[in-house]
């Protein structure tokens, strides 16, 4: 293991101060070598306090450490040496796209502690406060047609909702096509981007933003009525690394199952978690707004709507707004 990663894990597990002497013994290196690594880690942006008497302490105990995450994903889809764990970046989706363009294999991850320009769909922004959420993107190269790409978003939604419910006890729901809600508010969003070649997918980048330990007051004013976090909903803080691993494990399992047997079982769960069939809604797309009643979520992940004139319309993307009757 990279010695700096090992140092981070030692400090994280200590959950408080750890003496330089102990660190040097456990890591089988001199105290001055420990110090040099600490200096490097600080340069990379890790907030490590030091005290001549007590030793060292990680100021952010909820840090996501690469090797800690990767060891739990060893041997699977996300076991990729090309993966990046960053303190800070503009957008993990952008990073993952660059990696994909230069040949990074399926399963390559980009995880960041904070983003300066987190992206939503249609040039919207994703609020990404440092250390309080998951900002993750991964590269996929699925052998499906571009028309089926929405299925990957729905798979990611199911995995996120399931892992959230399992670890935190929250009743997470899915709002078509890419939002996860808790207590009726947005707790996570997914941004899938696709690069196509003729009629096949060259690569896909799936981005997930999940609000974990964000207190209400930390959200910008304009999001306070619509956004939420695990902390707000449960009153408790949760480990970001644990949630990250649970989501990735669930996704890996479902993606494998979909490749073997198709998307049916994920689709079934997605429909249960979506709870939108029969509801009166408005769909806003880039070009138009259509009112109607949801007939179904079809096998490609499209929303099928009967509009006020009785015509049936199918949407693969857009935003839905619930209409009151
Ligand atoms: C999304 O877009 O919901 C997709 C968000 C994907 C973010 C991840 S983070 C890691 C990866 N790297 C990136 O750069 N992006 C991905 P959309 O459905 O267009 O929703 C965007 C809207 O959600 C904004 O216009 C706000 O109204 C709202 N919003 C922004 N930040 C939020 C947050 N942290 N929590 C809840 N709502 C938020």
Image (cartoon, rainbow, N blue to C red):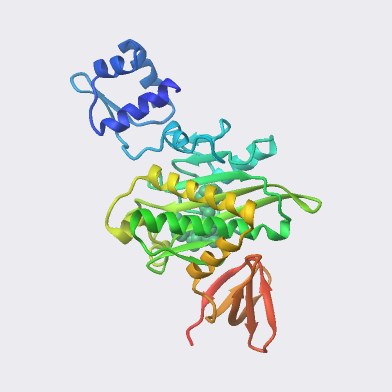
Q: Can you say which quadrant of the picture contains the N terminus?
A: top left
* Closer to us: 222 or 267: 267
Q: Residue furthest left?
A: 53
Q: Residue furthest right?
A: 198
- Residue 34 visible from this viewpoint: yes
Position of residue 21 relative to residue 266, above or below, is above
* Closer to us: 219 or 283: 283
Q: Quadrant of residue 7?
A: top left
- Residue 123 visible from this viewpoint: no
Q: Position of residue 6 (x, y in %)?
A: 38, 25
Q: How many marks?
A: 0
Q: Position of residue 142 (x, y in %)?
A: 67, 49
**Residue at the image point whose x is 30% and y is 34% from the top:** 59
**Residue at the image point whose x is 64% and y is 60% from the top:** 150
Q: Position of residue 130 (x, y in %)?
A: 40, 44
Position of residue 208 in the picture relative to residue 184 (left or right): right
**Residue at the image point whose x is 48% and y is 67% from the top:** 273
Q: Residue furthest front?
A: 261
Position of residue 149 in the picture relative to residue 124 (left or right): right
């Amino acid at each position: 293991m990279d010695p700096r990663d090992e140092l981070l894990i030692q400090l994280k597990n200590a959950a408080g101060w750890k003496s330089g002497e102990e660190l040097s013994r456990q890591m089988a290196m001199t105290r001055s070598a420990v110090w040099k690594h600490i200096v490097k880690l600080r340069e990379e942006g890790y907030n490590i306090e030091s005290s001549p008497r007590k030793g060292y302490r990680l100021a952010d105990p909820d840090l996501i450490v690469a090797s800690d995450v990767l060891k739990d994903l060893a041997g699977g889809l996300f076991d990729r040496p090309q993966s990046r764990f960053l303190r800070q970046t503009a957008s993990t989706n952008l990073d993952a796209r660059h990696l994909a363009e230069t040949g990074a294999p399926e399963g390559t991850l980009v995880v960041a502690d904070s983003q300066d320009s987190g992206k939503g769909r249609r040039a919207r922004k994703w609020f990404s406060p440092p250390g309080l959420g998951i900002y993750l993107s991964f590269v996929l190269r699925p052998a499906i047609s571009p028309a089926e790409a929405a299925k990957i978003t729905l798979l990611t939604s199911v995995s996120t909702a399931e892992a959230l419910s399992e670890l935190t006890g929250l009743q997470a729901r899915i709002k078509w096509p890419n939002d996860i809600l808790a207590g009726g508010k947005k707790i996570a969003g997914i941004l899938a981007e696709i690069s196509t070649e003729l009629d096949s997918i060259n690569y896909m980048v799936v981005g997930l933003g999940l609000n974990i330990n964000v207190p209400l007051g930390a959200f910008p004013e304009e999001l306070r009525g619509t956004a939420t976090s695990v902390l707000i909903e449960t009153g408790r803080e949760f480990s970001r690394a644990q949630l990250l691993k649970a989501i990735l494990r669930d996704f890996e399992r479902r993606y494998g199952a979909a490749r073997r047997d198709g998307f049916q079982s994920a689709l079934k769960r997605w429909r249960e978690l979506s709870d939108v069939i029969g509801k009166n809604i408005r769909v806003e797309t880039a070009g138009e707004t259509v009112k109607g009643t949801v007939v179904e979520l079809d096998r490609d992940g499209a929303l099928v709507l009967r509009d006020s004139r009785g015509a049936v319309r199918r949407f693969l993307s857009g935003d839905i707004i619930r209409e009151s009757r």
